[in-house]
Image (spheres, helix red, strand yellow):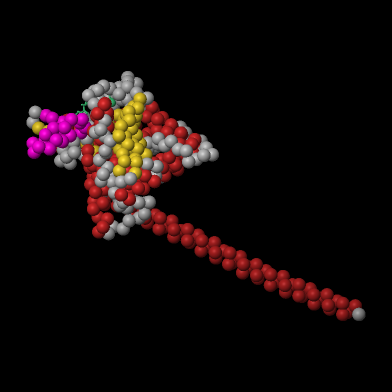
Amino acid sequence: MTMTTMTTMVGVAALPNQVFKKVHDAGSVFNMLVCGESGLGKTTFINTLFPGLKQRKGKKVSTEAVDIVRAQLTEKGFTMRFNVVDTPAFGDKVDNNRAWQPVVDFIDDQYDSYLRQEQQPFRDVRFDFRVHAVLYFIRPTAHGLKPLDIWTMKHLSQRCNLIPVISKADTLTAQELQLFKSRIRQVIEAQEIAIFTPPLDYTDGAEGAAGSLDEANAPALEHARQLIESMPFAIVGSEDRYDNGSGTMVLARKYPWGLVEVENDEHCDFRKLRALLLGTYMLDLITSTEQTHYENYRRTRLEGINRDEPNDSEKLASLTYKTPARKLSNNPKYKEEENALKSYFTEQVKAEEHRFRQWEQNIINERTKLNGDLEEIQAKVKRMEEEVRRLQARKH
Ligand SMILES: Nc1nc2c(ncn2[C@@H]2O[C@H](COP(=O)(O)OP(=O)(O)OP(=O)(O)O)[C@@H](O)[C@H]2O)c(=O)[nH]1
Ligand SMILES: [Mg+2]
C-alpha cells in the first residue's frame, strides 16, 4: 500500500457552513474508494477531483496496489481530511469469480478496525477509515452491464454507499449515453441494487429531520431530484487545462473537433458527482455509513452472521432492510407501492387495535365472571354460616 499526501483547495467552498460544521463534528474525515476494471480512468478521476495532486501526474501507469491519496482542506476554520483509496483493476483475470472480494474485504477490514477500537477502554482514540462512498466505474460500452458488474455492485451495495459511474463519457455520443444510462437504471432497479441517492425527504442533511415541502426547501429538493435523474453519473476525467476559446483555462479533453469540458454540465456529470461527494450530501454519506452500513456490519459480527453464507440469508434480510434504497425516478409504480405500503400499515395498526380491544373485552368478561363467582361464593358462605347458627341453636 502506498500513500500520497497533499494539501489542496478542493472545490468544497460551496459546502454550507452548517453542513461543514456538522461534517467536522462527525469526525472531520471523509473516505472514498474507487474501483472497477482496468484503464477506466479511476486514477485520473482522483487527480481531477483533487487537482493539487501534481506529483502523480503523467505517470499513466496501471495502479498495481491499493494506493491511498490523502488530501487536507482547511476552510471556514475547520480542517477536513480526505482519504481516497485507489484500487488496482479487477476483472482482468481469466477467473473473475469473486473478483470483488479484495475490495469487499478492504471495506469490511475498516469496519472491523473501527469496531475493535470501539471495544477498547479508551474509546475516544479513533482511527476512522470506514469507507463513506464507493465509486464503481462502469465501462462505456453502450451495451449493458456485465454479470461481473452486477455481482460486484450487489456485494458493494450491501455494505456501503455505492455510487456507480459511467467512465470516459466522452467516448459515447449523447444518444448512446442516454440509452446506456436507462439500461443501467433498469438493471439496478430490477436487481434491487441499493445505490446511494440524495435524500428527498429533507433538505439540508440535518439530523434526518423531516423537512416540509415548503418553498424554502424547493431549490434543494430540485437539486436532489436533478442528481437522482442523472444517475448513474457519466464522467470525464482530465488532468490538463485548455483555453475554452474565451480565454479561460478549463479542465478538458481535447479532440480535433473541440473540447470536452469536465466541469460543464452540458458535457458530463462531473460537477453533479462532485456536489454529491464533496457538497451537501457529504454528511448524508457519513451518517448513512455510520448508522446503516457500519451498524449492519457490527450486528453481523456480534450475531455471528456470515453475509456470504446462503443459509444465513434470512438473518441477513433482517439487516439489509435498513439499506437506503431510494427512488431512482418519479416512477408512478413507486407511488403505487408507497400507497400500498401505507394502507398495509394502516391495516396493521387497525388489526393491532382490534386485537387490543378484544383482549381488553376478554379481561372485562373475565373480571365480571370472577366477580359473579365471588358473589356466589360469598352467598354460599353466608348460607353455610346461617346453617351453622341454626344447628347451634338447635343444640342448645
Ligand atoms: N477518453 C477518456 N480517456 C480517459 C478518461 N479518463 C482517463 N482517461 C485515459 O484512460 C487511460 C487510463 O486512465 P487511468 O486513470 O490510469 O485508469 P485506471 O482506471 O486508473 O487504470 P488502472 O489503474 O490500470 O486500473 C489514460 O490514458 C487516461 O488518460 C476520460 O474521461 N475519457
Ligand atoms: Mg489506476
Is residue 74 found left or right of 245 in the rendered image? right
Instruction: Indicate the position of residue 193 as horizontal and vertical percent values.
Output: 33, 39
The residue furthest top is 94
Instruction: Indicate the position of residue 175 as horizontal and vertical percent values.
Output: 15, 37
Q: Quadrant of residue 191?
A: top left
- Can residue 161 be seen in this snapshot? no
Is 379 inside the magenta-drawn segment?
no
Instruction: Indicate the position of residue 115 as horizontal and vertical percent values.
Output: 47, 37
The residue furthest right is 396
The residue furthest front is 77
Assign the N terminus to one quadrant of the image. top left
Q: Is residue 325 above or below residue 387?
A: above
Q: Determine the residue positioned at 11% across, 29% down.
A: 255
Q: Is residue 325 above or below residue 168?
A: below
Is residue 376 found left or right of 287 in the rendered image? right
Say which of 350 and 67 sits in front.
Answer: 67
Q: Determine the residue positioned at 8% across, 38% down.
A: 246
Numbered disc total: 0
Q: Determine the residue positioned at 26% across, 30% down.
A: 53
Q: The magenta stretch spans which residues?
A: 236-255
Q: Quadrant of ligand 2?
A: top left
Is 247 inside the magenta-drawn segment?
yes
Instruction: Indicate the position of residue 251 as horizontal and vertical percent values.
Output: 17, 34
- Can residue 373 be seen in this snapshot? yes
Assign the C terminus to one quadrant of the image. bottom right
Is residue 268 found left or right of 74 in the rendered image? left
Q: Quadrant of residue 363?
A: bottom right
Q: Quadrant of residue 244?
A: top left
Q: Determine the residue positioned at 26% across, 38% down.
A: 9
Say which of 6 and 284 sits in front.
Answer: 6
